[in-house]
Image (tube, rainbow, N blue to C red):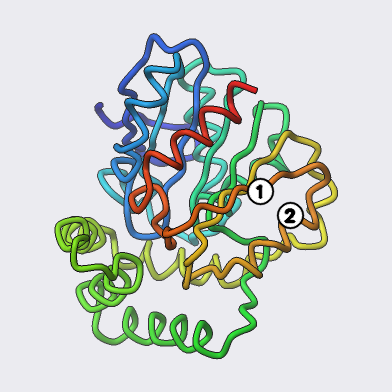
Amino acid sequence: MPLIDLPTGVQLHYLDPNPSGSKPVLLLHGLGVNGASWSLQFAALAEAGYRPIAPDARGFGQSRYPGGPMTVARIAEDMAALLEALGIVSAHVVGISMGGVLALQLALTRAQMIEKLVLVNTFARLRPERPSVWAYFALRMILVHTMGLEAQARAVARRVLPREDQAAMREIMIQTVRQANPRAYRGAMRALALFDVQDRLREIRLPTMLVTGADDNTVPPPLQRRLLLGILGAQQVIIPNAGHAVTADQPEAFNRCLVEFLDS
């Protein structure tokens, strides 16, 4: 797909592998990666009749970074503008990690554009309870400001994809993160650290499913449970033997619960 110029002042790249699908599904990626990180979901969604749309956030993948502050509100508005540019009135919205934060922002500011909301290994406020998780985030912040994206990419990939049989996926992730704009990456990290809508979750009145990797050591399950307690009527699926990258760890299990929820 070519870059598309949006009224928000950014050129956004997106993947649209099944444009004839009957219902759009906006797929929002995690920090450092891009829309292609949803590739293991494309076929399942297309076979179920959906139209997966996976953009690269500004400064990531092939999307341009126009400069200026990186805020959650600004990145989320890019996604709403993309749907409008494609003539899409409403869509299901699925977000993992940073993408889940963007999905929450859209649920609060653009609820009329969302049919169903799927939040994957994400948070409303990043306040971990375990010291080890705080230490990990502190290390990431230090690495990205001192040693650059290469060191950041390797630290994140090793934590998110730790198994030996994930070596190939780990290398892909490292190469993908290295392509990000360093200023965009640092700005997005700061925006995520400042994000806090915990006290606004009751405003969300959308059919919502939380998907949690049982072994997520980046956004631990207790932190994700705050979303379940805050969003009225939300349901949660916990996928065993899956970490933060649940979409890659257990794609068949993830795809099954995703399609079942969207079809329900």
The answer to whether residue 165 is left or right of residue 196 is left
Provide the residue designation for mark 2. 228
Q: In which quarter of the image is residue 194?
A: bottom right
Viewer-proximal residue, 247 or 242? 242
Counting from the top left corner in percent of width and height, residue 189 is at 46, 69
Q: Mark 1 or mark 2, which is nearer to you?
A: 1
Q: Quadrant of the N terminus?
A: top left
Viewer-proximal residue, 64 or 88? 88
**What amino acid type is highlighted by mark number 1?**
Gln
Query: Who's the residue at 81% across and 42% down the image?
Result: 233
Query: Who's the residue at 51% across and 49% down the image?
Result: 75
Query: Who's the residue at 44% across and 35% down the image?
Result: 255
Q: How crowded is mark 2: few (under 14 residues within 10 Å), some or many (20 or more)?
A: some
Counting from the top left corner in percent of width and height, residue 9 is at 44, 40
In the depicted structure, whether residue 124 falls above or below residue 93? below
Counting from the top left corner in percent of width and height, residue 147 is at 24, 84
Task: Report if the CB atoms under discs 1 and 2 are less than 8 Å apart.
Answer: yes
Tell me, for residue 236, which label it has, or none.
Answer: 1
Q: Quadrant of residue 127?
A: bottom right
